[in-house]
Structure formats: structure tokens, C-alpha cells
Amino acid sequence: MANKAYTFSDFSRLIDDDFSWRRNELFLFKTRIPDDKSVSFQKPLLRAGIAILYAHWEGFVKNASTLYLQHISYKHLKNSELQSQFIALNLSNKIKDLEINKLEGKTKIINFLFDEYHKKANIPFKSIINTKSNLKFDVFLDILFTLNIDSINYQANELLINDLVDLRNTIAHGEYKEIDYDTYNNFYSETTDLMRKFKTDIENAALLQKYIKKVSVTI
């Protein structure tokens, strides 16, 4: 089987595999944490549990997003067929080399865009998705925009995402933070649900080809 997202089936299988091993590892870790605060190793496991929750959340967003860009890239569509975000990704490296301070430079960019518009796109996907090692809500919104995925369904998750990052940073920086089992359990449930929601949205985007520009019909 292909290890690259050439087709939708390839993409769906790869993203499902990535989600599955992360979900299984998180569940396995959770089952090892005793629901009894008198057990001496509960506290360190709860702290470690938060750290691994964040690691899988960030890792899944980055990997799934990269696979999606890879899938679009392998479609070999023309710039004219793509949504604006993906044209920008394709041409950004070329545009940044053009001088834009003078009108002559701006004119060159306009001509360049006209020339490139009907050419095949070569969308980059390696090292494009940047979680900044702190996947705060504003960073996540930038990723959603890059992928042309509607952010409206994630507005209610802003507090969860930011709190998870902050708590993970406190733990990762070696500061003491006591976490009770209920707090961890809530983070576990909400974060795994969020990962599942993102998986569904990005699979739907690929299935419905939301990377393709909608053509308006004039009657």
C-alpha cells in the first residue's frame, strides 16, 4: 500500500492510521492511572498524562495537515483551479524574491501572477505547517486558514486549547503543578474529541475537494 496520499483512499487510510495509534496510546496510558489519590504514583502519572495529551494533539494536527497538503499537491492541479490559500502557498517563495517597493516591481508581480495562473501548481507540503511548538488557539486558526477549513466549529474550543498548552508548558518547564484526576479526565475526553473532530473535518475537506475553487455560473 502507498505510504503517500496520492488518492483520497490513501489519504484517508494514512490519517486514520495516525489517529488510531495516538488514540490507542492515550487510552492505554489513561488506563494505567489509578483513580485513587492515595496511590503514590498517581500525581506524576497525571502530570505526564497532560504532557502526552498535548504531544498527540500537536502531532496529529501537524501530521494530518501535512498529509492533506501532500494529497492536494499530488493532484497536480492548475493554480486557476485552486482556492487562493493554495495558490499563495505555491507561489509565495517565488513572489518573495521580487522587488515590490517600486511600481515597476509591483507590475512585475501582477504579470508574474497572470503568467503563473494557468500553470500546474506545485504545492509545497514539507515544513509548511508550523505549530510553533505551542499550538495555541491563534496558531491553530492560522493552520485552519491555510487548509481552507472553516474555524466556526472550533470557537468553543479556544479555552481548552489554550489551557492545555499552558498546563503542558508548566509541566515541561519543570514547574510543580498538582493535577487531580477529574481535571486530567476532562482534558483527556475533550482533547480526544477535538482530535476526532479535526480528523473528520480534514477528511471531509479532502473528500469534497474543498481545495478546488468554486466556479460561479452566470445566467
Image (spheres, rainbow, N blue to C red):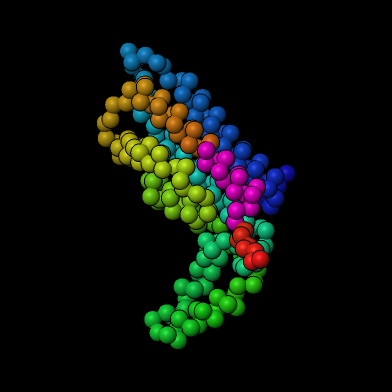
Point 38% across, 81% down: residue: 101
Residue 112 appears at what percent x and percent y? 55, 78
Judged by its main secondary structure, the magenta piece is helix
Relative to 118, does residue 216 appear above or below in the rendering? above
Classify the position of the N terminus by image quarter: top right
Q: Give the quarter of the image for residue 184.
A: top left
Q: Position of residue 125 (x, y in %)?
A: 56, 57
Query: Residue 91, how many percent across, how many down?
Result: 54, 69
Residue at the (40%, 16%) spot, across then down = 35
Front-most of 43 and 180?
180
Residue extending farthest left: 176
In this picture, is 179 found above or below 12? above
Residue 201, position as x, y percentages in the image: 55, 43
Nearer to the camera, 94 or 208: 208
**From which residue to which does the magenta span run?**
197-211
Q: Nearer the viewer, residue 18 or 208?
A: 208
Seen in the picture, residue 109 relative to 54 is either above or below; the reply is: below
Q: Which residue is found at the position 60% from the left and 78% from the top? A: 115
Horizontal side, residue 105 vs residue 15: left or right: left
Horizontal placement of 39 versus 28: left or right? left
Most extreme residue toward the bottom is 104
Q: Is residue 204 magenta?
A: yes
Residue 194 horizontal side relative to residue 218, left or right: left
x 49%, y 33%: residue: 193
Above or below: residue 159 compared with residue 178? below
Q: Is residue 171 magenta?
A: no
How many labels sit on residues? Answer: 0
**Is residue 58 something that shows in the picture?**
no
Q: Nearer the viewer, residue 107 or 191?
A: 107
Q: Is residue 147 visible?
A: yes
Give the farthest residue toward the right: 1
